[in-house]
């Protein structure tokens, strides 16, 4: 395909998958349970953190996590007591356990009290053409309190070569504003042009088949390569193609 043909093909797939029906099977349905900005941010961040493995399990455990916080995540984060934290001890999603969750809640309280929230960290640390350095800044801030060493693996760092798929997905949810009611667009001071595609096995295979990605590993360098090529197709909203790559890979077995 020529670049124009590729753009037309992928734009059609975006229109097909960037629809409210997408919410039925996607983790983004969890932050859509809420209306308050901070509730959406915190529920989205915690859901993205555990968004790996079986999708049904992700949704079940993310909803359970919200229930453990009395369906009021910002209030729980802001006002929790040590007894409240102990109620989280039994939570498990794969390798993310109660010990990790309890630290994440404490770290989020610190971020909302001292760092102007998650949005503040990303806004202050965004670069001209990328949010990847801001992800590294988030990780540094997040683990600035005394913490279990095991918990650090649950936030990826692009500076150390990670594709940071789950954080890039969370950023798409928060920054990108669409007309279909899927992505939230809660952070208007950050441009969707800075977003990177959440790169995983499915989107990587499709991107390689379409000639958008040559690098074999799904790592930070692959994200940068895919960014460059998607921005040629739409410099203002390149990450909309996540819907196309994901839909083609997961639902159509393309690639």
Image (tube, rainbow, N blue to C red):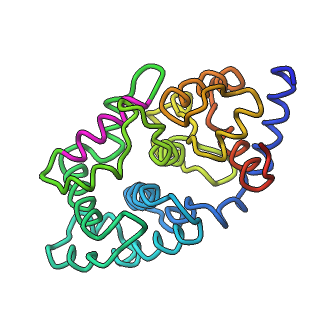
Tell whether position 238 is magenta.
Answer: no
**Image quarter in which the N terminus is found:** top right
Percent of width and height locating residue 11: 79, 36
Work out whether residue 227 or residue 113 is closer to the camera in this orientation and state it: 227
**Image quarter in which the C terminus is found:** top right
- Residue 242 lies in what quarter of the image? top right
SS assignment for the magenta stretch, majority: helix
Q: Is residue 165 above or below residue 148?
A: above
Q: In this view, does 139 lie to the left or right of 30?
A: left
- The residue depicted at 57 percent of the width and 40 percent of the height is 199
Q: In this view, does 220 lie above or below 23?
A: above
Work out whether residue 186 or residue 233 is closer to the camera in this orientation and state it: 233
Percent of width and height locating residue 96: 36, 63
Q: Looking at the image, how many numbered discs can be counted on the residues?
A: 0
Percent of width and height locating residue 28: 56, 59
Percent of width and height locating residue 203: 66, 42
Q: Magenta region: which residues?
A: 131-143
- Residue 156 lies in what quarter of the image? top left
């Amino acid at each position: 395909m020529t670049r124009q043909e590729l753009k037309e093909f992928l734009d059609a797939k975006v229109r097909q998958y960037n629809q409210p029906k997408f919410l039925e099977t996607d983790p983004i349905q969890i932050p859509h349970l809420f209306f308050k900005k901070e509730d959406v941010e915190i529920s989205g961040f915690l859901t993205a953190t555990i968004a790996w493995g079986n999708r049904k399990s992700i949704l079940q455990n993310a909803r359970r996590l919200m229930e453990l916080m009395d369906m009021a995540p910002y209030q729980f984060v802001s006002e929790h007591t040590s007894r409240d934290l102990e109620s989280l001890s039994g939570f498990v999603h794969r390798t993310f356990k109660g010990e990790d969750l309890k630290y994440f809640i404490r770290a989020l309280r610190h971020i909302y009290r001292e760092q102007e929230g998650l949005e503040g960290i990303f806004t202050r640390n965004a670069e001209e053409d990328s949010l990847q350095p801001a992800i590294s800044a988030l990780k540094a801030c997040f683990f600035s309190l005394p913490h279990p060493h095991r918990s650090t693996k649950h936030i990826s760092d692009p500076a150390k070569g990670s594709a940071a798929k789950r954080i890039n997905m969370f950023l798409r949810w928060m920054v990108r504003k669409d007309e279909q009611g899927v992505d939230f667009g809660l952070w208007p001071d950050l441009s969707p042009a800075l977003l990177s595609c959440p790169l995983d096995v499915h989107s990587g295979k499709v991107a390689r088949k379409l000639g958008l990605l040559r690098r074999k590993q799904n790592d930070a360098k692959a994200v940068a390569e895919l960014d460059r090529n998607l921005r040629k197709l739409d410099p203002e909203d390149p990450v909309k193609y996540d819907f196309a790559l994901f839909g083609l890979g997961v639902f159509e077995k393309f690639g």
